[in-house]
Amino acid sequence: MYAVANISGQSELRAFAEKWGLVYSSTADLIAFQRRRSALVERCAPPVAMPTKFGVFTAHCYRSLVDGVEHIALVKAQSGNELPHKLKPFLGSTKPALVRVHSECCTGDIFGSLRCDCGPQLEAGLRAIERDGWGVFLYLRGQEGRGIGLGAKIHAYSLQERGLDTLDANTELGLPVDSREYGTGAQILVDLGIRDMRLISNNPKKFTGLAGFGLRIVDREPSHTAPNKENIGYLRTKVQRMGHMLELGDSSDWAENGAPPPVSGGSQTSAASQDEE
Ligand SMILES: Nc1nc2c(ncn2[C@@H]2O[C@H](COP(=O)(O)OP(=O)(O)OP(=O)(O)O)[C@@H](O)[C@H]2O)c(=O)[nH]1
């Protein structure tokens, strides 16, 4: 294999490869290929019961072999007569699991920040999986601020106070708009035995990011929460600049005075047809 250092663009590289009958690939392609082939995670604890205010789940904990970050999957898998805490609760089942892959958000998930919709999405996701009885809430740590980290996200907020939107604020800091990768999450889901799933998300990048690891997303379940006056700009930017599949309605649908919004419709599964609209 030869690394060609003095060829500047893709088209030059393609021409060079064609001229000499070579196969060529970008570094990004090689990294993606490697991620698909190698193990990215290992279990770091036995499964254990996790009673929560949303219901009783089984917690499965994994560690990334790439960066050492630990992730947690809360599993609901009631199939009747199974052993408690099976390692692969979904293995062999043809019933698609309801899955939420949630990016860490300290401010929204823990402190209830109204700047984003993360906290209400977390609660709605856990409620939906509890109600469904067959699914996984996968909490990906290390994805704070869409991958830029907590301090940088807070810095980005300070730029947002000066009028920049959530994307431009990251760019202004010289940081990527979204550096999350989903290979790690995909491998956790595969390890739990999932093959077919209904993904709770509005983010088109998650659908492409999770595909290709032996997982099949058979349906989308919208993750809708009522906007509030603090996060409406953030949500509009997600729709307009990141292609999120969200319907924001008008201000009469907003939660009062920035209060924690109730989940619209009460069910994540109710609006699955938004995809087809
Ligand atoms: N950089 C940055 N990150 C943010 C901001 N607000 C929330 N986040 C982070 O965004 C991540 C959540 O991503 P979102 O784009 O809101 O939603 P998503 O998870 O991609 O999509 P859904 O599955 O539809 O929820 C979390 O890691 C949050 O910490 C912000 O203003 N700037």
Image (cartoon, rainbow, N blue to C red):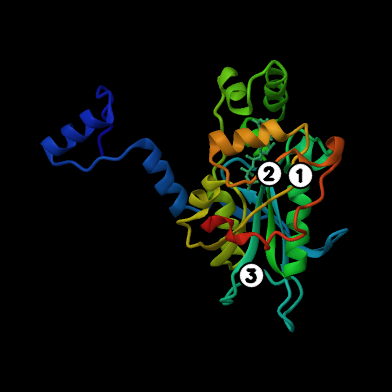
Among numbered discs 1 and 3, the one appearing first in the sequence = 3
The amino acid beneath tag 2 is: Gly
86 or 164: nearer the viewer = 164
* Relative image position of residue 236 (x, y in whole percent): 63, 35
Q: Name the secondary structure under disc 3.
A: loop
- Cα–Cα gap, marks 2 and 3: 41 Å
Name the residue tied to disc 1. 253
- Say what secondary structure mark 2 lies in: loop
Evaluate whether residue 72 shows in this view: yes
**Residue drawn at 68 percent across, 44 percent down:** 249
Rendered residue at 54%/56% (across/down): 275
Q: As rendered, which of 86 and 195 lies closer to the eye?
A: 195
Whether residue 245 sits left or right of residue 137 in the image: it is left
Identify the residue under disc 3: 88
Q: What percent of the width, then of the height, locates residue 261?
A: 81, 45
Whether residues under marks 2 and 1 lie with C-beta atoms below 8 angstroms apart, the answer is: yes
Circle 3: residue type: Lys
In the picture, measured across the screen, residue 40 lies left or right of residue 270, that is left
Q: Is mark 1 within 8 Å of ligand 1?
A: no
Cβ of disc 2 within 8 Å of ligand 1?
A: no
Q: Could you say which disc has been placed on residue 249 in the image?
A: 2
Q: Indicate the quadrant containing the N terminus: top left, top right, bottom left or bottom right.
A: top left
Mark 1 or 3, closer to the camera = 1
CB of mark 3 near ligand 1 (< 8 Å): no
Give the distance between the C-alpha atoms of the residues marked 1 and 3, in whole angstroms: 41 Å
Q: Residues within 10 Å of mark 2 (few under 14, many from 20)?
A: few
The reply to whether residue 47 is visible in this rendering is no
